[in-house]
Amino acid sequence: MLAAFLVLPRILFAADPALGTWVKNDVPIVMTIEPYGGGGWKITYHIKMGAKETLMTLESHMDGSEASVMLDGKPSGETMAIKRVDDRHTFTVLKMNGQPFGTSKCEMSADGKTLTVQNDMTAMAGNPAAKATEIWNRK
């Protein structure tokens, strides 16, 4: 009986197609998605700038609640409220110091090899409003 309880979480997490390592196709950023809590994700971004690597992490319950974004283990002031729409889609509200500054829609390809993220950012702190699409490939 105990063995069934130990194996069940692995089976449930294995069914989440987004778990794994993803590489952004136009810049040196690697994203790792791991299980967190009961169906949530721990997301770690490895951002390479020259010889320096910065780690950006968050732990989301994937229910639309806000999760703090950490930079190298310290609070950044940013939060992401990620909601799982279905097994291939998420919707995220981004805030900085409590002020909304954008949304992101993510779609996983049917073959599970590509994530397409559509970002819609509002004007904030001197930065103009912008829309951008990111492509992430499974590593």
Image (tube, helix red, strand yellow):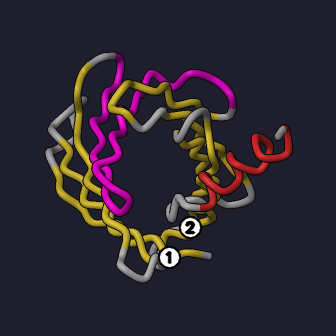
Q: Position of residue 123 (x, y in %)?
A: 15, 37
Instruction: Report the side of 38 relative to 93 (left or right).
Output: right
Looking at this view, name the residue that lies furthest to the front: 1
Is residue 69 visible to us here?
yes
The answer to whether residue 47 is visible is no
Kindly identify the residue that appears in the image at 58 percent across and 58 percent down: 31
Q: How many marks?
A: 2
Q: Is residue 75 magenta?
A: yes
Region of the chain picked out in magenta, as a range: 73-97
- Quarter of the figure with the N terminus: top right
Report the front residue among 110 and 8. Answer: 8
Residue 87 percent coordinates (x, y):
38, 59
Give the image quarter of residue 89.
bottom left
Looking at the image, the residue that sits furthest to the top is 98
Q: Residue at x 28, y 49 (%)?
A: 85
Quarter of the image with the C terminus in it = bottom right
- Mark 2 closeness class: few <14, some 14–19, many ≥20 residues within 10 Å: many
Q: Amino acid at mark 2?
A: Trp
Which residue occupies the foreground of this view, 108 or 68? Answer: 108
Residue 125 higher or lower than 108, as above or below: above
Residue that numbered label 1 is attached to = 137
- The picture places residue 99, in percent across and down from the top left corner, at 25, 21
Residue 47 is drawn in which quadrant?
A: bottom right
Q: Are marks 1 and 2 in contact (CB under 8 Å)?
A: yes
User: Is 20 situated above or below 81?
Assistant: below
Residue 22's label in the rendered image is 2
Q: Position of residue 124 (x, y in %)?
A: 21, 32
Task: Mark 1: give few (<14), some (14-19) or many (20+) Cα within 10 Å.
Answer: some
Q: Gap in Å between the C-alphas at discs 1 and 2?
A: 5 Å
Instruction: State which tag comes first along the sequence, 1 or 2.
Output: 2
Q: Secondary structure at mark 1?
A: strand
Residue at horizontal 23 percent and vertical 43 percent from the top: 103
